Image (cartoon, rainbow, N blue to C red):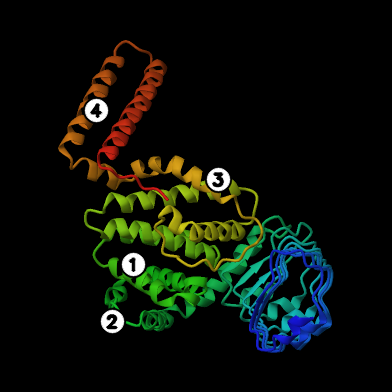
Amino acid sequence: PEIGLLTQLRKLTLSLNQLTELPEEVGRLTELTDLELDRNQFTALPRVIGQLSKLKYLSLHTNAIKEIPPEIGQLRMLENLNLQDNHLTALPPEIGQLAQLGMLSLGSNHLTALPPEIGQLAQLGILHVNHNQLRALPPEVGQLTQLRSFATQGNPDLAELPLSLGTIPGITYLDIYDTRIPQRVANALLASTRALRDREADSDLPRRLGVWKAALDAEAPALAHIEDFEVSEKLSINEWLTRLEKCPDFRGNQKEMARIVLGILESLKNHPEFKEQFFAQVETNLGCCEDRAAMSLNEIYTAYLIATTENPPLELLAGVAKTLALRKVVMGALAGTEGQGESVEIYLRHETALRERLGLVTAIQSGRYTDIGRDLPENALIAAVESNYLDELFDLPIFQTIAEKDPGYRESYERIRAQFTDKQEEIAKGLSDQAHKNQSDQLKYEFNQAVRDLQRNWLQTKNIQPSR
């Protein structure tokens, strides 16, 4: 009961306990803006929750809550509501009264329907209803004009989407994995929303670049060369920036993210090979969510550093290699187990969490990615990265270029190559085509192994021991 005396308390975190209920006195904490009650054993919320009129963030994921009291509608300042991984079967219609709500996470419950009042959430940008038992969506979902991310995966009986979603220009992410919704429908809706954005891109891009320059809070590059880009390239840049603006890092670390992104765009002027790689990477990921845009930024960032750093140090390349190894390990472990958006979000959580310990090279630096309860064991990830990153390092073309500048390495490499060239010529005599192919493949394998051994030995002489 004494908790009710903390009348000036603004943030209360009681996660990771075994709490089964909140005392009524919590209703006296009228200055509270953040309330985190994740991973407890709550089965219900007290009605006094409605008295917390200044609450902006309420997280109750991973409990056993069966229903939400109608008083939830009194939280008129609430911006983020996380009810993921509970036992909810329905939502009260009062949910529609949360006029400032920007994110609503309802994944992993037992919902069979959403109330039509959900269409009244005029500020809602992120709606996750994944892994429920939804059979249909109310047409009022199409009234969510600020919606940009809609996760419906894991509702096996869900067969339709409101076609009015195609008129909401902000939607950049739509996950229908493990539903009956035809992929062509989702693709058509996303194509429609992007077409709406592209229609305004010519006038939007200068304004958007201005926003990023302002976020830098310093002298920004002119980026005048972008004016001479192809129309398709301008559209891609505009769409890429649109999605990045929705990433947690842009909201929480704008200055650093602006520095990196504007530096990348400036480098397109004088690095044609990187420019080609940049647009290929960006366009590949534009069909995905903003988290995928964040992940693609990290992928682009590593290529950018290598392309624009004269004589990149081996320590930098080792960090790049560890980052590549982590991506393979995490995405491989999640393959086929999650919707695309969830896999990317889980990966980004691990990447930001392990950034310092592993010396990863990433543009996205914050840990502002939602805990969705499906993280992988960190110690196992670290061990896998340490075991595999050298292969990623040796596969970087720039590594071989740097190594060959060493006369001793170059001499050894040329000797190995000459030996295997001689062997290749020998097996070409008097063998059938199939036998020649088999022996040739074996020689290639042995050659690659010999080069790997040379690379490992050379790296040891350089005293490069990148580790956590």
| Structural crowding at the residue carrying mark 3, measured as other residues with C-alpha within 10 Å and reported as few (<14), some (14–19) or many (≥20) | few
Residue 176 visible = yes
The answer to whether 67 appears left or right of 290 in the picture is: right
| Image location of residue 140, percent across then percent down | 74, 79
Earlier along the polypeptide chain: callout 4 or callout 2? 2
| Image location of residue 186, percent across then percent down | 64, 64
The answer to whether 234 appears left or right of 1 in the picture is: left
- Residue type, mark 2 in image: Glu
Q: 189 or 462: which is nearer to us?
A: 462
Q: Is disc 1 in contact with disc 2, using a CB cutoff of under 8 Å? A: no
Q: Going 38% across and 62% down the picture, which residue do you hit?
A: 279
Q: In this view, does 382 lie above or below 219?
A: above
Earlier along the polypeptide chain: callout 1 or callout 4? 1
Residue placed under numbered mark 4 in the picture: 417
Residue placed under numbered mark 1 in the picture: 264
Q: How far apart are marks 2 and 3 (CA)?
A: 43 Å
Residue placed under numbered mark 3 in the picture: 380
Label 4 element class: helix
Q: Is disc 1 in contact with disc 4, using a CB cutoff of under 8 Å? A: no
